[in-house]
Image: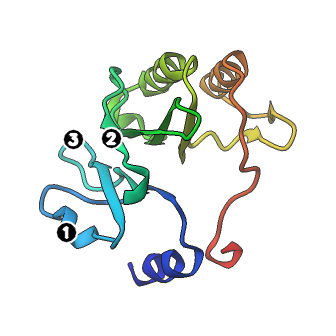
Amino acid sequence: MDFLSANVRVLDPDIIGITESWMDETISDAEMFMEGYDLFRCDRPVKMRGEGVLLCVKKELQAVKVDVIRDFPEQVWCKICVDSGYDLLIGVCYRTPTEQVFGKDNHSKLRDMLSDVSDMNFILMGDFNYRHIDWSIGACQSGATEECRLFLECLQDGFVTQHVTSKMTERSL
């Protein structure tokens, strides 16, 4: 938490998306409190430790929580009204690569959710665990699963653009 707090003080971001928060009902929002931010969260909805997502948005943006009506389990969304008068949907998602947590159709639930928001103005952050996508060229590498190919196709069909093309490390901050 100290590393996060220090980076927030230095970088002063408007929006922070966090995957694998590892929060559960025993951890209150106050424990994750960052002054000047509204906190939105989705803890892992099954009784297994781990994962979950957080979204922190500067209070001045007046974000409002939005529920995307889909079965995808680890997601949190809010909307803000942009100066030009349109709403911007902001989300954070985590797709576990482990079938034992949510079953075999978690990848199709993710694609369904993306299809639902694709006609809106949105920013989606997260970890989708499709390691065989080469984002620099927008193609699957050899060894990619059918689910990986379908995910990339879903993004391309919805004209969704990936802006991050490399892994983030503490050293890259």
Farthest residue in the left direction?
26
Query: As displayed, is residue 11 above or below residue 48?
Result: below
- Secondary structure, mark 2, is strand
At 21% from the left edge and 41% from the top edge, which residue is drawn? 46
**Who comes first in sequence, dot 1 or dot 3?**
1
Q: In which image quadrant can residue 20 be found?
A: bottom left
At 64% from the left edge and 19% from the top edge, which residue is drawn? 154
- Per the rendering, the mark at residue 44 is none
At 56% from the left edge and 41% from the top edge, which residue is drawn? 83
Amino acid at dot 3:
Val
- Secondary structure, mark 3, is loop
Q: Which mark is in front, 1 or 2? A: 2
Amino acid at dot 1:
Ala
- Left/right placement of residue 43 relative to residue 59 reads left
What residue did someone put label 3 on?
A: 46
Q: Where is residue 173 in the image (x, y as percent from the top left)?
A: 66, 74
- Per the rendering, the mark at residue 64 is 2
Mark 3–mark 2 Cα distance, whole angstroms, equals 25 Å
What residue did someone put label 1 on?
A: 30
Amino acid at dot 2:
Val
Query: As displayed, is residue 133 above or below residue 31?
Result: above
Classify 10 Å Cα crowding around label 1: few (below 14), some (14-19), many (20 and above).
few
